[in-house]
Image (cartoon, grey):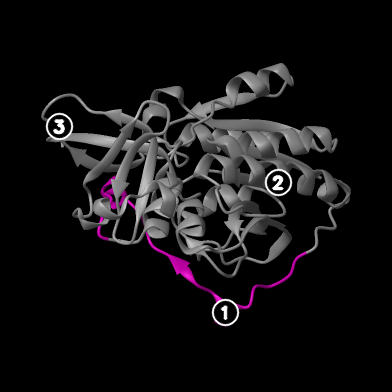
């Protein structure tokens, strides 16, 4: 069995690494064109790695382009892997692959189907996972090929969880590689009655409400952090993106400061950063970025 890989982010690179290390035959690689990099969080170009591995490569802006279909036809894959690709793969592409198409999702399916899974995992304190599953018309609902839980640590930022999930994905693919090559892929139907779904998130969802508790705000900052747009607030009439933070201890918050309104700056420390009043305490903003004047 051979595989044709399509993708656009770091999990796509992880899948390519796992397939190569597992000795799986790769007939070609499809990668989102570099001109669209600014539109995709966690974008990664697949062209360089594909060329280093000596693999045929084709870039695209839309997976539905006729040239993509021609590329897939020309390389006759047994399996089409669409990993880290936000675009819907047309059925006509899936049908070219003799054994269907495989997708990836980083939650404990059937829980956490849908959009922005990394952000929601951190926001809601849920479990993460590296899943490979067969694509169906319903997103994230196909039979599971392999599922490996990924530990989520209390202070994980989005980039930390993405990196750890990618490491687990590489190892899962290496473990799966004998089954890929033999054509004997395991498949376990999902229990649809236990499915939960995450809604889409936008950059505006990163606005900090200082009236909320410290833990809630800290989760938002970690969930919205790199490679995503970041949590943000307004300070002195300017938008401030908060990339990193740390909850303050009770000893660091003077009793007088607790009388301040949420969102007030309690202290400015050259080493610690800004200490902000939250709904139930304080939060150090340890890495921030101010926008140009007047931008809110």
Q: Is residue 108 visible?
A: yes
Give me the C-alpha separation between circle 1 and circle 2.
24 Å
Mark 1: secondary structure: helix
Please rate how many residues cluster around mark 3, counting C-alpha atoms within 10 Å: few if below 14, some from 14 to 19, many from 20.
few
Give the residue drawn at x 46%, y 52%. 119
State the predominant SS element of the stretch in magenta.
Answer: loop
Q: Which is nearer the N-term, disc 1 or disc 3?
A: 1
Q: Earlier in the sequence, mark 1 or mark 2?
A: 2
Q: Is residue 141 above or below residue 102?
A: below
Residue at image location 42% in from the left, 33% down from the top:
272
Q: What residue does disc 1 label?
A: 194
Pointer 3 or 2: first along the chain: 2
Marks 3 and 2 sit apart, C-alpha to C-alpha, by 40 Å
Q: Is residue 149 left or right of residue 241?
A: right
Q: Is residue 76 visible?
A: no
Residue 253, percent across and down? Answer: 35, 50
Q: Residue at x 80, y 62 (%)?
A: 186
Residues drawn in magenta: 187-211
Question: Where in the figure is residue 12, as x and y percent of width and height?
Answer: 61, 38
Vertical order, 240 against 83 (above or below): above
Q: Is residue 279 above or below residue 87?
A: below
Under tag 3, what secondary structure? Answer: loop
Q: Which residue is the extreme one toward the bottom?
A: 193
* Label 2: element kind: helix
Residue nearest the observer in this picture, 88 or 202: 202
Which numbered disc covers residue 169?
Answer: 2
Q: Which residue is mark 3?
A: 295
Could you tell me residue 161's position as x and y percent?
58, 46
């Amino acid at each position: 069995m051979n595989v044709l890989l399509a993708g656009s982010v770091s999990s796509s690179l992880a899948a390519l690494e796992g397939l190569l290390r597992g000795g799986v035959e790769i007939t070609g690689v499809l990668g989102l064109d570099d001109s669209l990099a600014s539109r995709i969080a966690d974008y990664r170009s697949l062209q360089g790695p594909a060329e280093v591995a000596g693999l045929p490569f084709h870039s695209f802006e839309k997976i539905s382009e006729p040239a993509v279909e021609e590329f897939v036809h020309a390389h006759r894959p047994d399996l089409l892997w669409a990993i880290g690709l936000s675009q819907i793969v047309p059925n006509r592409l899936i049908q070219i692959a003799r054994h269907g198409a495989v997708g990836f999702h980083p939650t404990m399916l059937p829980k956490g189907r849908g959009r922005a899974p990394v952000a929601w995992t951190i926001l809601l304190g849920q479990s993460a996972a590296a899943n490979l599953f067969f694509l169906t018309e319903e997103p994230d609902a196909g039979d599971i090929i392999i599922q490996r839980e990924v530990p989520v640590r209390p202070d994980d930022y989005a980039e930390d969880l993405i990196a750890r999930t990618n490491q687990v994905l590489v190892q899962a693919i290496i473990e799966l590689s004998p089954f890929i090559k033999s054509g004997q892929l395991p498949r376990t139907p999902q229990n649809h009655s236990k499915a939960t779904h995450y809604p889409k998130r936008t950059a505006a969802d990163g606005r900090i409400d200082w009236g909320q508790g410290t833990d809630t705000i800290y989760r938002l900052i970690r969930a919205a952090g790199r490679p995503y747009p970041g949590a943000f607030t307004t300070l002195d009439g300017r938008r401030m993106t908060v990339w990193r933070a740390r909850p303050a201890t009770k000893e660091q918050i003077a009793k007088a400061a607790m009388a301040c309104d949420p969102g007030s700056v309690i202290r400015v420390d050259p080493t610690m950063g800004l200490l902000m009043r939250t709904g139930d305490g304080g939060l150090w903003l340890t890495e921030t970025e101010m926008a140009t004047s007047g931008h809110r």
